[in-house]
Amino acid sequence: MKAIRRFTVRVTLPEPLAALQGLMLNLRWSWHRPTADLFASIDPAAWRASGGDPVAMLSALAPARIAALAADEEFLGRLAGAEGDLRRYMTEPRWYAAGGGPAAGPAAIAYFSPEYGITAALPQYSGGLGILAGDHLKAASDLGVPLIGVGLLYRHGYFTQSLSADGWQGERYPSDDPNGLPLELLRDASGAPVHVAVGLPGGRELAAQVWVAQVGRVPLLLLDSYVEANEPDLHQVTDRLYGGGSDHRLRQELLLGIGGTRAVRAFCALTGHPAPEVFHTNEGHAGFLGLERIREYAGQGLSFDEALALTRAGTVFTTHTPVPAGIDRFEASLIAGHFAGDPLLPAGRVLALGAETWPGGDPAVFNMAVMGMRLAQRVNGVSVLHGQVSREMFAGLWPGFDTREVPVGSVTNGVHAPTWGAPEVLALTGAAPGQTSGYDWERAAAAPAGQLWAARRVLRARLVAETRRRLRASWRQRGASGAELGWIEEVLDEDVLTIGFARRVPSYKRLTLMLTDPAALAGLLTDPDRPVQIVVAGKAHPADEGGKGLIQQLVRYADDPAVRRRIVFLPDYDMAMAAFLVQGCDVWLNNPLRPLEACGTSGMKAALNGGLNLSVRDGWWDEWYDGGNGWEIPSADGVADPARRDALEAAALYDLLGKAVAPLFYDRDAGGIGQGWLERIRHTFRSLGPEVQAERMVREYVTALYTPAAAASRALAGDRDYGPARDLAAWKQRVTAAWPQLRIEHIETDPAGQAPGSSLTVRVTIALGELTPDDVMAEVVYGRPDDADEITAPSCATLTAEGEPANGTARYSGDVPLDQPGPFGYTIRVLPHHPLLGSRAELGLVTYPQAPAGMTNGDLR
């Protein structure tokens, strides 16, 4: 009989074991091995059966075992030690407050993301964005950065993946009861659950309760729409991650941004946690948080423009997509309907924030990434290359500026070493069990050859055993009988070069590039002297039929008895699977269409474990590949025919595997050790170990983005009277209104023909109209011109005002260095100037001599 409802009864622990409750509900156990080992020791079989989930394991534990533990003095001693260790971790000053962090850092930062990959036991993630967000929270906790995470609690999470008999992806959405997860409900002083609500069209209201996941020192607030106050259709708003149509997605994002901000306010009021000074929007899904902050300020009597200035100053926006198709875009009419009648957030002003105002933009849509950029004074991509791609993609928001001046920077992603590093590898750094930072990668690189080679073999053997176990389960699920599966015991070999490929399956990641020439791949797999073996995993979005077709193509290839012992597709890729893959593979393969991989962190995880990357130079690999820490797959940039490009890059892949990678792996000394291979591992530890860590990433966010954002926010707040914000908003309005009157009237220079090393004196007359010299800055933009007189790699020299303006006209002059022979070109431009602007391009206003139409006014007001 099928139950009509289900819920979880949490285990009640006797007083001697009460400390287990605190350990269980703090997700530090997911990366703190001593705590995980303590849980595992309770019942190793039950721990494995639960997938390493202490809540599930303890809930299934027999009463007799609980009673025995409560009387076990040795266990109680270990429990007391673990509790004390957690207490110290939660309270001792760490980097942020112990002298390593900035003295003027924000009191708190609110970090919003649509998904979080903390542990497989809390399935609230789909892929890289969520894993990155989880690693961000963990590293912030280890560093003592006062972060508050905000997200949604998806009752069905992302889907679990299975394969049909013919290799087609199937999806199932398991139902998770929050009471069975490592969460606690946020309650008010009376013990009642805290609810937040978001208004919807037609006078309806979307309510949510707030669950708290404690991620080390960082509270993660997860909003849940399954509350009785909601109408039945609104219960489903937080049903699943990235599901439903536009209306459903919009409601999720409104709840995340607006409801999430209200949840933060309620949490801080109840717990005494410092209120955030900085709000970090991790991708555009959470962008509505900026509108809620504008509403908060407007409720205190500020105008929309004053509130916008304050909101921008304290907001950081991180974009993760290098393609317009990856951005959430809603019909503008749908957005207008949600904000119609709101006196604090006029619909017209809201729509302007997400409008695609550049040539070719769609006036009928509301672009969430564009709104994110207009609501944040600090914007970044997630690798150096992605920052460059983002500046090009969004250059239309800042017409008249060189692409390099578009105010989008970059902080390259990182991965959380305690989560993804194998104990055998972290031990090589000299790290103690449970150590979360301070890894000595030079020490790991200097480990004895035998020790390092043996550690890699242990990890490969673990991968082989886990692959066989999962492959058997998959074939049984596909309908095979146990009698048919004897061959699985011969799948993979712990002494064979092992390649990993695991990620989401959109077309640009090219899951099946390796199948471009099936015979060539088979030759590599079955080479009698230097075979390779490949483990593949990945999920296609449920609505992506093309991605499912790619998976089926690879599964059918891997099913062929001629190669199935050397290539495997494992369904249901998740964090637990990712851990043994990135730890056990010798080579991590990545072959996206360049430059469509924003960062791609799975290869970083492999590098932490001594895996070598074999990748197209995209994302982080473009930045840190140095010729010795892996191999570059040449990218056929500029080849327009997709099939030809795939063929060229696949041929390069086969060539690298057959002529460089495999020969190096199998080149052994008299002791059976590949010294050349180990040299690449050693170089990987030295060159990548310190760089790829999330700790480095979070430090960069703190110093380069969070602290300046807090300073800017404080500067605009003044003495809490918001006087500077009012002044800045008034200045922006005045300058924007007067800008069309500004003209560059006259330019004169000394005679041309100066020798290299001399300078060119430039004098300019500018009609300021109603503006003053303090409102603007004048520059010479100069450099080498191309055949169309476009200045390539331009430099800027600031001109100085000469005396007081007369009749609204001012004179400026300055010297431009002539530091190289050859063609030289220059132009003049005038920009708004104010000490509280985040960048020279912030207003999108610039005037050139005889500027083409559309070049003198921008859209960021």
Image (cartoon, rainbow, N blue to C red):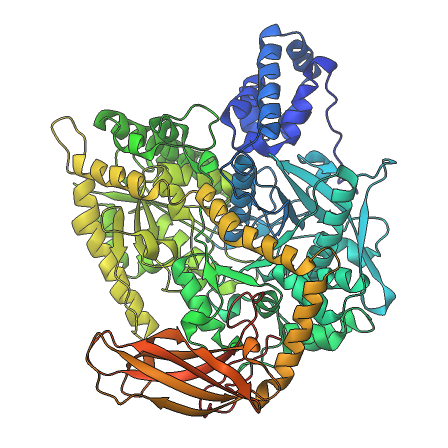
Is residue 200 placed above or below 153 in the rendered structure? below
Q: Position of residue 236 (x, y in %)?
A: 74, 55
Q: Tell which of 266 and 653 is nearer to you.
A: 266
Taking the spot 54% from the left edge, 85% from the top edge, the residue there is 805
Q: Tell which of 126 and 533 is nearer to you.
A: 126
Is residue 506 placed above or below 638 in the rendered structure? above
Q: Position of residue 101 (x, y in %)?
A: 51, 41
Taking the spot 27% from the left edge, 87% from the top edge, the residue there is 787
Is residue 79 placed above or below 509 in the rendered structure? above
- Name the outermost residue toward the left: 670
Q: Tell which of 342 and 512 is nearer to you.
A: 342
> Is any part of residue 452 visible from this angle?
yes
Q: Classify residue 512 as left or right of residue 759.
A: right
Quadrant including the C terminus: bottom right
Taking the spot 57% from the left edge, 75% from the top edge, the residue there is 843
Q: How many marks?
A: 0
Q: Position of residue 634 (x, y in %)?
A: 25, 61
Q: Position of residue 797 (x, y in %)?
A: 38, 74
Q: Classify residue 43 as left or right of residue 100.
A: right
Q: Quadrant of residue 342?
A: bottom right
> Is any part of residue 164 visible from this angle?
no
Quadrant including the N terminus: top right
